[in-house]
Amino acid sequence: MQHPFRNPNLSLFRTFRFRITPHSLLNLHLHNHLSTDSNSTSNPTPTTTSTTSTTSSPIDAGSSNRKPISLWPGMYHSPATHALWEARSSIFENPNALSSSQNQIQPPVPKAPSRSRTSIFYNFSSDHILREQYRNPWNHIRMGKLVEDFDALAGTIAFKHSCNEDGTVMPLLLVTASVDRMVLKKPIHIDADLNIVGAVTWVGRSSMEIQLELTQSAQGNPNISDSPALVANFTFVARDSATGKAVPINQISPETEQEKLLWEDAEKRNKLRKKMKAEQKHTVIEDTARLSALLAEGRIFSDLPALADRDSILLKNTCLQNSFICQPQQRNIHGRIFGGFLMRRAFELAFSTAYAFAGVAPHFLEVDHVDFVKPVDVGNFLRLKSCVLYTELDNPAKPLVNVEVVAHVTKPELRSSEVSNRFYFTFGVDAEAIKNGLRIRSVVPDTEEEARKVLERMDAENSQV
């Protein structure tokens, strides 16, 4: 299990604080509408029998966005990502930043974590409009949108750390390379204020790790504590915007004891990641006994279906999928599809898969390590395929459902399809439903490929624990 955020000291999280309040945008649209109505009534038109109709001026759908289009990424935003994109675009609007972006990359310099520390505050307790955008049908938090916001915040932090000392922007592409295991440590309440804060904790030559922490304000609620509810570690890599090659970035200079501890933890994780990748390249599941045991029940489903275990189901019968074209509105500041958008779509498909499998709405527990293997571009035909890989029924009162989502970039013109991402989610099932007699089935692979994949995921899960 991932180690908890050590000694969280919220007093350290003091800079770059954004308060998400969509009321200003709402008021702007309302003002335009009222102004239009008032103009139409201030100059009354005499009543005539003419069939020619007069209409008021149309409402300008883009009235709230008057910045040059080059300063904005795709406009598919949650309130949080909207605020973060505004923060980034304010840097681009600096004349010095724009002129410097055409120059060569400056030599990297050490920067303290406090220089990139950023927080987002969600005023759920009093902002009903904001809360409604993050509420799911069961009046819980919509985790997919929070995961999307996590990626946006990590990108902003990486962006700030990569800026030059004079505030100008280096001509870099900052790409999400991976996301470490995210474990939900306690429930997140939709009616309590929420804060996400993060900073750069470790830097290699051309990569950086960013740790994000989600906390909720207790506000007198005995069911809420101030300890972190969710901790995530994002790894970003820097590429030259012209050549696409890796480039050195600003190093990090930890100042406090806590920052030094975080750096040491991140260094250990980085070494462990490299070791696991090297082992995976040479590891082949050769445990024939385990493979045979997994495939035995699957053969009964195929050869003797009337005698198959009624508490089991074939893996292929748990699958769902959806497809969509990646639109320009979903791109990030570099013109590629926003990683948070992909994570949200994968999460929502995984949730639907677990829901259809269990028969009750599941609750999120964790997302395993995610590698962004290939970038996804505007116009790509993306196919998301999901299935329940296996269930954990050791504790009948708390069964676990493990879902895999694979994203394929499909190019019909070239008759090609490549895997861009693999996502692994774990969901729990409501204890009350289990008490009322709900039973979660075992999932059975019926091909050797499926069986190997299940064993690989089980082994990976055990190694992390």
Image: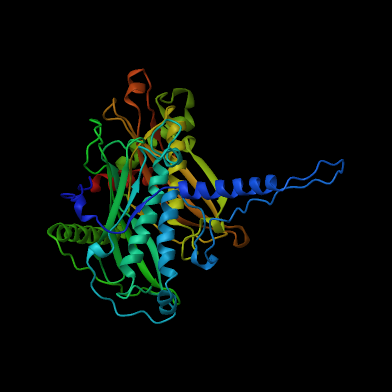
Specify how the rendered protein is coloured. Answer: rainbow
Q: Is residue 420 above or below residue 49?
A: below
Q: Is residue 47 above or below residue 268?
A: above
Which residue appears at 39% of the width and 32% of the height? 362
Q: Nearer the viewer, residue 214 or 322?
A: 214
Q: Quadrant of residue 140?
A: top left
User: Position of 257 compared to 440: left or right?
Assistant: left
Q: Nearer the viewer, residue 40 or 123?
A: 40
Q: Quadrant of the C terminus?
A: top left
In this orientation, does residue 237 appear? yes
Position of residue 231 measured from the top left corner of the image (x, y, whole percent): 27, 48
Position of residue 352 measured from the top left corner of the image (x, y, whole percent): 46, 36
Question: Which residue extends farthest left?
Answer: 257
Position of residue 110 measured from the top left corner of the image (x, y, whole percent): 23, 72
Q: Is residue 84 above or below residue 249?
A: above
User: Position of 45 compared to 288: left or right?
Assistant: right
Position of residue 334 measured from the top left corner of the image (x, y, whole percent): 46, 66
Q: Is residue 141 above or below residue 81?
A: above
Q: Quadrant of residue 90?
A: bottom left
Which residue appears at 47% of the width and 49% of the height? 24
Q: Nearer the viewer, residue 127 or 322?
A: 127
User: Position of 5 compared to 450: left or right?
Assistant: left
Question: Which residue extends farthest bottom?
Answer: 104
Q: Quadrant of the N terminus?
A: top left
